[in-house]
Amino acid sequence: MTSERSRKDLALEHFRRLNAGDVDGLLELYADDVVFEDPVGGDRGAGRASLRAHFAEYVAANLHEDPGEPVAGQDGAHVVVPVSAVMDYQPKGPAFAERGWLVPPAAPEGRRLERHSMVMLRMDATGLIRELKAFWGRSDLTVTS
């Protein structure tokens, strides 16, 4: 069991490394057999190699996530964080539009996506992240200029 403070700090470190584009450093926070779902209800992924590809796509989209205050679960394992994010429309936007998650803009060049979500992380007893789930729906994703 990890302390609430250490879980909250680990969650914030996740966002710091992601915003810095440090995919290798970010993966150091995760267990080898990590499972993830972003968004919940979308495709599930497993393992660091799959997670690396997932994070690399977001880094390529110039993602910046602004985390709110983490909230710890009483179970010694979970943290939930509200997140506001912005990223370039390319390369993720067309795939989101194809899935019906947003209406594609007539002129995508220079456009950005804004997303509001809740990110749930589950840590193991060693302090590594074993599970990531991002909760967001169609109404949480918008195209901006």
Image: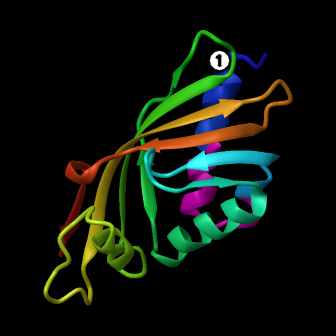
Residue 31 visible in the current orientation:
no
Along the line of sight, the residue nearer the viewer: 38 or 10: 38
Along the line of sight, the residue nearer the viewer: 140 or 25: 140
Residue 104 visible in the current orientation:
yes
**Which part of the image, by quadrant, shows the C terminus?**
bottom left
Question: 94 left or right of 122?
Answer: left
At 59% across and 65% down in the image, what residue appears? 54
Question: 17 left or right of 30?
Answer: left
Q: Residues within 10 Å of mark 1 (few under 14, many from 20)?
A: some
**Which part of the image, by quadrant, shows the N terminus?**
top right
| Image location of residue 52, percent across then percent down | 69, 65
At 57% across and 27% down in the image, what residue appears? 79
At 44% across and 61% down in the image, what residue appears? 64
| Image location of residue 100, percent across then percent down | 26, 65
Residues rendered magenta in the picture: 13-25
Please give the residue where the numbered disc 1 appears in the rendered image. Answer: 4
Q: Secondary structure at mark 1?
A: helix
Amino acid at circle 1: Glu
Is 16 covered by the magenta stretch?
yes
Q: Is residue 94 above or below residue 101?
A: below
Question: 118 left or right of 33?
Answer: left
At 45% across and 53% down in the image, what residue appears? 42
Q: How is the image coloured?
A: rainbow
| Image location of residue 113, percent across then percent down | 29, 67
Q: Is residue 109 above or below residue 87?
A: below
Q: Is residue 126 above or below residue 49?
A: above
